[in-house]
Amino acid sequence: MNKNRKRILIPVIGVSLFVLVVCIRMLWDGNAEDKKKGIEYLKRLEAKDVEAIERDVKEIREEARVKAMEEGELPVWAQFNDYVIFGDSRTVGFSFHEFLDGQRIMADGGLTIEDIPTYLDKMKTLNPAHLFLCTGLNDVSIGFWPAPEEYVAAYDETVTMLMKELPDTHIYINSIFPAQDPAFEQSSLWRNIPDYNQAVMNWCKEKGYTYIDNTEVFEAHKDLYDEDGIHFQKEFYEYWAINMLAEVEM
């Protein structure tokens, strides 16, 4: 996967200073337990290489940003910058509720990965730094890909095409939110969504693609589904957005 063109690479000295500041704050401002953790962390750093330290710093920064958004200290929707979100009727909610710019939400009821080429020209015009793919609901029920492996093969061709056409764009692949009763009366195939998610996750790991696992969002907020067991209430979208942003390097 190509790196985000707007990603700020952290120099070694910057990483070191950031970690040092974190540890100093723990030692200076913290209680006895915090100071103990700070000392232990500094000792562990001695045995780590720069790459490992960068991963730790990235994790610390991401956790802090997510916590700030969850607690309302950081406005969620303002964190979306230079992006496009493609998806189906669920994704429409981002623009329908006026959370995000409708020009950057390329979504409609019934869309699948087969429809991505139709929107390619619009995507190329915007040339976003971040492209979030939020498909799957219709992909599973439409019957074009009756086995998860077939779906992954088609998805791989699509992502390969996108990487070629949008070389400066970082692509994020959302897991499919499960359906709930009474949705299965409309399509029993939606019961297979977990199998498709597992196949997509394995494929992303193999290819090094960024996979956004929405399992915890579903488990924590399944009460915010509409009565149809398919679509989401307005309040749901902020939780989904925070989970997507957690994967974006600022």
Image: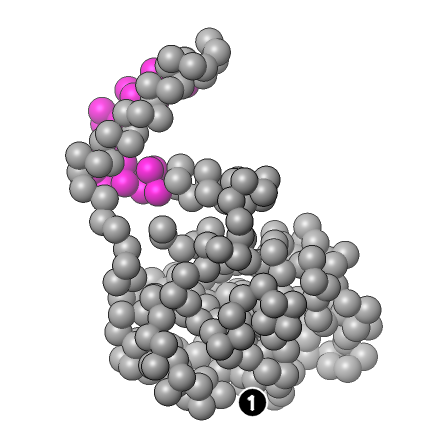
Magenta stretch encompasses residue 51: yes
In percent of width and height, residue 28 lies at: 38, 13
Q: Residue 41 or 92: which is nearer the viewer?
A: 92
In percent of width and height, residue 166 lies at: 30, 77
Residue drawn at x 26%, y 74% as measured from the top left: 167
Report which quarter residue 95 is drawn in. bottom right
10 left or right of 86 in image: left
Report which quarter residue 182 is drawn in. bottom right
Q: Which region shows up in magenta?
A: 37-58
Residue drawn at x 54%, y 66% as measured from the top left: 100
Would you say residue 160 is visible in this rendering?
Answer: no
Residue drawn at x 37%, y 20% as measured from the top left: 25
| Quadrant for the N terminus in the image | bottom left
In percent of width and height, residue 170 lies at: 34, 66
Q: Residue 69 or 179: which is nearer the viewer?
A: 69
Q: Residue 89 or 68: which is nearer the viewer?
A: 68
Residue type at numbered disc 1: Phe
Report which quarter residue 178 is drawn in. bottom right
In percent of width and height, residue 187 lies at: 73, 81
Q: How is the image coloured?
A: one colour
Q: Residue 142 or 198: which is nearer the viewer?
A: 142
162 left or right of 173 in image: left
Q: Main secondary structure of the magenta part?
A: helix
Could you tell me how many numbered marks the image carries? 1
From the viewer's perspective, is residue 216 above or below residue 146? Answer: above
| Residue assigned mark 1 | 144
Magenta stretch encompasses residue 234: no
From the viewer's perspective, is residue 167 above or below residue 4? Answer: below
179 left or right of 196 in image: right
Give the secondary structure at mark 1: loop
Residue drawn at x 36%, y 71% as measured from the top left: 128
